Image: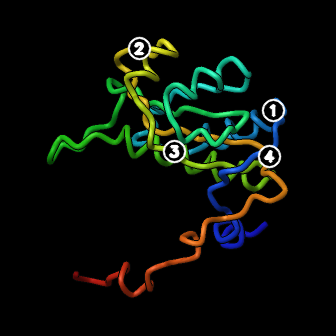
Amino acid sequence: MDFLKLAEERYSVRKFKDKHIKQNEIDLILKAGHLAPTGCNYQPQKILVLNSDESISKLKDCTKCHFDAPCAMLVCYNKNESWVRKQDGALSASVDAGIVTTHMMLMAHSIGIGSCWVMYFDPFKVRDTYNIPENYEPYALLVMGYPADDAKPLDLHFKKRPIEETVFYDTF
C-alpha cells in the first residue's frame, strides 16, 4: 500500500470484533514502533501490551474510551532517558513516544488492525494498576483490534482545514 493511501484510509476505530489480536500481528506492530526514530536514538519508550481479558478489564477502570477493544498498547517514556535541547532544555522523550505511537498505529492499519489513539485516561490509575515505575510517563494508549463489520470513521474524520492554513513558506 502506498503511504498516502495508507494515511488517508486509516481512521480511529471505535468498534471492534470480540477477538484478540494474533501474536505475530502484535509483533509486527511492535517492530514498527521499535524502528521509529528517536532523539539521538535514545529510545526512551516502554510499551505495555494488554492483550488478555484480565488486563483489558483493568484498563476499563482507567478510561471510558476503551471502546471494548480486545487489545491495547500503552506507550510510556522514560523521563530519565531523553535527549535534551541545549538552548531551552526541551526534552525529546514525549515527541519520541508520539513518533513510536504513530508508527505502530499506521502499521496496525496496514495489516488490518484498527486502532484509536486515546489520551483520555487517568495516568495515576494506569500507573497504579500496571505497576509503572515513577520514571516512566504514561503517554498514549492505542486501543486496537479487528474492526467490527460496521465500524466506520466519525464524520469529523473527513473534515480537514485547507492546507494553505497549515503550511507556510519562509515566514508566518
Q: Is residue 172 above or below residue 70?
A: below
Q: Is residue 18 above or below residue 110?
A: above
Say which residue label 1 marks.
20
Q: Is residue 62 left or right of residue 92?
A: right
Mark 3 or mark 1: whose residue is earlier in sequence: 1
Q: Position of residue 77 (x, y in %)?
A: 43, 30
Residue that appears at 64% across and 34% down: 72
Q: Quadrant of the C terminus?
A: bottom left
Q: Nearer the viewer, mark 2 or mark 4?
A: 4
Q: Is residue 9 above or below residue 124?
A: below
Residue that appears at 55% across and 44% down: 101
Under mark 4, the amino acid is Tyr
The reply to whether callout 1 and callout 2 are in contact (CB within 8 Å) is no
Residue at the left extreme, as displayed: 88
Residue that appears at 46% across and 40% down: 97
Say which residue label 4 marks.
146
